[in-house]
Image (tube, rainbow, N blue to C red):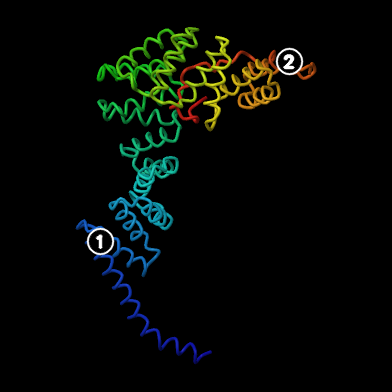
Amino acid sequence: MRRFIGYLLLLAPLACPLLHAQAAAVQSQTERAGALERAGKYSEAEAAWLDVLAAAPNDAAANAHLGLVYALEGKYSEAVPAYRKALELRPGLPGLAMDLGLALFKEDHLAEAIAPLKQAETEDPKDARAKLLLGMCYYGAGQYGSAVPYLRAGVDQAPKNLDLRLALAQSCLWASEYTCALEEYRVILQQDPNSAEADMIAGQALDAKGDTPGAITQFRAAEKAAPNTPEVHFGLGYLLWKQGQFAEAEQEFKAELNLEPNHPLALTYLGDIAIKNNDWAGARAELQRTMAQPNASREAVLDMGIVDAQEQHYPEAEAEFKRAIAMDPANPDAHWRLARLLQTMGDKSEASAELAKVRQLHESKDQRLVQQMSHQPASSQP
């Protein structure tokens, strides 16, 4: 053992110069990589930082610089793991959380970007970039209530940015902050009197507040300003349908289909109007078109059940009513339709059970236009 220890002691003087030489080589590679990066020679800098990391894989700064070079080259998917590695090695490295959040934002990984951007906000509460990116990430991830304060801060910094103000107005609308949505609409209108998008937001907010006639006025203004805007005809048609103005609503739904031939809800409500007109063949034709699409709406399923029941396709109607109930158990209309069908089929016991459920349920209040507009992500719906 003594001879072995002595042997190691003899080797030690030889090892020290070798380690110093390796460290010097890494330092030289690091300086070269940094110089290439500062010179804007990003592809060469990328290769140089990879050389540094081959020798020192746990160098947090080198990982951070490699991530930055990737980002500067537009290679955000490659920048993300490099930034994550750097953060793992040195969680408090200044600016790194912001860089990671921005790379995730650029990759459209909005929900993932929120955590590092929140860290960046904590590190520098005055950083307006982090707040604006957080607002857009919350907005894109469908977390509209969380988006509102950040987007409002962004609008305060850039009050003439209409795109940002529209995002704020939409977030207010989808977070059920209708007064906020209307306030933003009025500001937008001062800057752009012909903003169809703002008119539509205001219309949805007014309808949600119970002013459907006022909402119709707003949608007519939007339609006049930009008749080819997606959803404008559907929105107006739905409001007219709610008011029982079926003939005019029908024309609006058809106008929407001229823009989007397979608009599922326009087809659904055309089918519903056909039912109201006792045009069963016409209703089936419209509803079959929407039922053929993925994720058919509850309204389409219910109306197809009504058509099947009318035409005495009882098993099909029963299945459709039960499917509509599964899609929204708290809405009494499908329970009532199923109860009537079961009575017709002679199943008195189950029919009574369904009628009891109808009595327990309040009339559905899910009649707001904001919950019908197909461009609104499902996650925004209350």
**Looking at the image, which residue is at 32% across and 67% down?**
51
Q: Which residue is mark 1?
A: 34
Can you give x and y, in whole percent of width and height, for residue 257 in the image? 42, 22
Furthest toward the left, the residue is 39
**Circle 1 crowding by C-alpha within 10 Å: few under 14, some 14–19, many from 20:** some
Q: Quadrant of residue 350?
A: top right
Q: Where 159 falls versus 238 (above or below)?
A: below
Task: State the SS at label 1.
Answer: helix
Q: Amino acid at mark 1?
A: Gly
What x and y, as percent, mark residue 233? 40, 18
- Tell me residue 18's x, y (percent): 34, 80
Q: Do the residues under discs 1 and 2 have CB atoms within 8 angstroms?
A: no
Q: Nearer the viewer, residue 245 or 24?
A: 245
Q: Is residue 212 left or right of residue 27?
A: right
Q: CA distance from mark 1 to mark 2?
A: 75 Å
Given the image, on which type of amino acid does mark 2 rest? Ala
Q: Which residue is mark 2?
A: 356
Residue 136, by quadrant, is: top left
**Closer to us: mark 1 or mark 2?**
2
